Image (cartoon, rainbow, N blue to C red):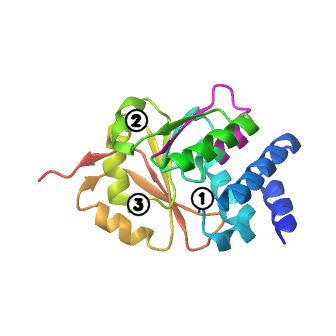
């Protein structure tokens, strides 16, 4: 089953053999570290290629010119580390992984070393480092917080031209309604390639609603 998933995902995203081998290392590391630190839901490891790898890979196509990314709450490296592994052939690619948990940072650092992924791991809280990363092309976050909170964290980036890519589930519309109470932002909803009920919220500008 996992082998079939792998074959299908690699074909759908036109992944080279070399990159596929590096993604294999990521998947192996994820399974190994899962026994030490609960990085992902245990049941999702059975569908790791579809639930995690493919879900991350789809973001690359949404920002083909982006070179500097910021991934919030990186955890198991989804999507940030997977994006770095897959997009490392892009000249000048750099992905900042922000994660406050030291053990998860150890996983990110070691897996990046093994795969040669072009990342910088920040073992810190989002609000303490986000202001130093202005000028990034894209900021992303998966399964981290409601959209209103994500916009609050990423305001220093989004108001200066960074694009936000935030994968959301079936509650995306409700999160947008809630966010509209505090924020004015240009956005569009992109259907997810891995879940027919999910959407990727792309944000291209941001300001606070006037009181």
Q: Choose between 27 and 147: the one closer to the eye.
A: 27
Which quadrant of the structure image shows residue 197?
A: bottom right
- Where residue 173 sits, quadrant-wise, is bottom left
Q: Residue at x 72, y 64 (%)?
A: 48
- Is the residue marked by circle 1 packed among few (<14), some (14-19), or many (20+) residues within 10 Å? few
Q: Is residue 134 left or right of residue 19?
A: left
Residue 85 magenta: yes
The residue under label 3 is 145
Residue depicted at 54% across the width and 53% down the height: 75
Magenta region: 82-99
* Count of numbered circles in the view: 3
Q: Are marks 2 and 1 in contact (CB under 8 Å)?
A: no
Inter-mark Cα distance, 2 to 1? 36 Å
Disc on res. 209: none
As helix, strand or loop, the secondary structure at mark 3 comes to loop
* Residue 210 position (above or below residue 92): below
Q: Is residue 13 above or below residue 198?
A: above
Q: Residue at x 59, y 46 (%)?
A: 80
Q: Which of pointers 2 and 1 lies earlier in the amino acid sequence? A: 1
Above-or-below relation of 58 to 65: below
Which label is found at residue 37?
1
Q: Is 156 rendered above or below residue 174? A: above
Instruction: Decide if residue 71 is on the left or right side of residue 18.
Output: left
Alpha-carbon span between mark 3 and mark 2: 22 Å
Query: Of discs 1 and 3, which sits in the foreground?
Result: 1
Q: What residue is rendered at 43% in x and 29% in y?
A: 135
Q: Residue under circle 2? A: 161
101 and 170: which is toward the camera: 101
Q: Residue 171's spot in the image, x, y percent?
A: 44, 73
């Amino acid at each position: 089953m996992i082998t079939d998933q792998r074959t299908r995902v690699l074909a759908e995203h036109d992944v080279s053999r070399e990159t596929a081998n590096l993604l294999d290392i990521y998947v192996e590391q994820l399974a190994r570290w899962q026994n030490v630190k609960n990085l992902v839901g245990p049941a999702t490891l059975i569908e790791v290629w579809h639930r995690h790898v493919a879900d991350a890979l789809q973001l690359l196509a949404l920002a083909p010119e982006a070179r500097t990314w910021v991934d919030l709450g990186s955890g198991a490296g989804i999507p940030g580390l997977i994006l770095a592994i897959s997009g490392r052939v892009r000249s000048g690619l750099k992905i900042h992984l922000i994660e406050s948990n030291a053990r998860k940072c150890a996983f990110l650092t070691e897996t990046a070393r093994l795969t040669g992924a072009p990342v910088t791991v920040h073992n810190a809280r989002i609000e303490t480092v986000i202001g130093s990363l202005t000028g990034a092309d894209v900021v992303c976050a998966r399964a981290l917080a409601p959209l209103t909170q994500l916009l609050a964290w990423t305001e220093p980036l989004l108001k200066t031209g960074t694009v936000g890519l935030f994968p959301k589930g079936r509650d995306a519309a409700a999160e947008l309604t809630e966010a509209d109470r505090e924020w004015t932002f240009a956005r569009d909803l992109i259907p997810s390639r891995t879940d027919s009920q999910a959407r990727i919220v792309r944000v291209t500008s941001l300001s606070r609603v006037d009181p």
